[in-house]
Structures are given as C-alpha cells and as structure tokens.
Amino acid sequence: KVSLYQPRGNYQLIVDRMEEAGDGALRRQFELLKTKLDEEGLFAEEEKQEVPELPESICIITSKTGAAIHDVLSVIERRFPSIPVKLFPVPVQGDEAAPAICKAIKLVGEASSSGKLNCDVILLVRGGGSLEDLWSFNEESVARAIFDCPLPVVTGVGHEVDVTIADYVAD
C-alpha cells in the first residue's frame, strides 16, 4: 500500500507479503532439480557415454532458424567437412520446446539403434539468452531424455557462462 506521512510529505510503501519471482524462483527451482537428479545419479561420470573422437555422422537437434545452427555448421564445415550432418529442427524456447526436444532425442536414439539412421553423436544446441529463454534445457523431461538416450549427447546451450541441467546430464 502507499501511504503519505503528511507532516514531512513523505510517501511510504507498506508491504504485507513478498514472494520470489522471475530469476529467484527459477534459480531455486533449478537448484532443487539439480540436487534431485544428482542424487539419482544422472550426473555421475560412470554413466557418461564415450563421445567418439571422429564421428561418422552427427545429428543436430536445435532450431533451424537460430544463429546456433549456423555457428555449429560453420565449425563442422571448417574442421570436419566430410562428416555428414543431419538436422532435427525443434523449437528451443517456449512451452512446446521441452516436449519437442524430448521427442527428437528419442526419435534419433531409436532410429539409430534400429539401424534406420546412421548417427554416432547428438549435438543439442541453442544460442544464448536469459534464464527464462534457456529454461527448456532445465526441464526434468529433457534431462531424462538425454540420460536415457542410447547415443552420446553433447550440449552447447547458451553463452559460455550459461549452465543448464542438460549440460550436467550430457555426455
């Protein structure tokens, strides 16, 4: 509430209750999930799959329109031009992103295991953004999809300083 102390002409803000919102609430949610998944062993080094030094084929899961795909393809073209790359486009932000990411990871993993797709490693990438922008990569469903994938998953999410739950689970 706003009140006025008339003798001095001062305004006062009277707060009855405060709640965390935005970054504070998301950060706490992040830490709780991180602790839970760590205790379940999803981050354990012995659970990590070996990433091939020189893959025969790379599958990339990301947005087809973002800067991240252009950066990744540029690096692959420069360093390993003969390695075939397959793009599996997904939204990387918003409510539909986490389910689409999970579906793509499962699809690539199953197709590779059944011999329908030649893929040695999955790159899960997204450009930078705020904590809210990157939140799809902090969803428990995405973490479990990465952990359950029969192929090694390498993440490149956000800027260098950004860390997501997906990064902790990835190989």
Image: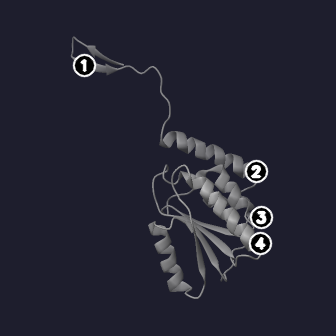
Q: Residue at x 60, y 57 (%)?
A: 100
Query: With 110 as the anchor, is 32 left or right in this view?
Result: left
The CA distance from mark 2 to mark 3 is 13 Å
Q: Nearer the viewer, mark 1 or mark 4?
A: 4
Q: Residue at x 45, y 56 (%)?
A: 129
The CA distance from mark 2 to mark 1 is 54 Å
Look at the numbered disc 4 and give the secondary structure of its residue.
helix
Which residue is denoted by mark 2 in the rendering?
A: 40
Look at the numbered disc 3 and give the secondary structure of its residue.
helix
Which of the marked residues, 2 or 1, is nearer the chain's N terminus? 1
Look at the numbered disc 1 and give the secondary structure of its residue.
strand
- Amino acid type indicated by mark 3: Glu
The CA distance from mark 3 to mark 1 is 62 Å
State the mark number for residue 113.
Answer: 4
- Amino acid type indicated by mark 2: Glu
Which residue is denoted by mark 3 in the rendering?
A: 46
> Which percent across, then down, holds residue 39?
74, 49
Q: Nearer the viewer, mark 2 or mark 4?
A: 4
The CA distance from mark 1 to mark 4 is 70 Å
- Amino acid type indicated by mark 4: Ser
Residue 23 position (above or below residue 155)? above
Q: Nearer the viewer, residue 107 or 146?
A: 107
Which residue is denoted by mark 1 in the rendering?
A: 10
The CA distance from mark 4 to mark 3 is 21 Å
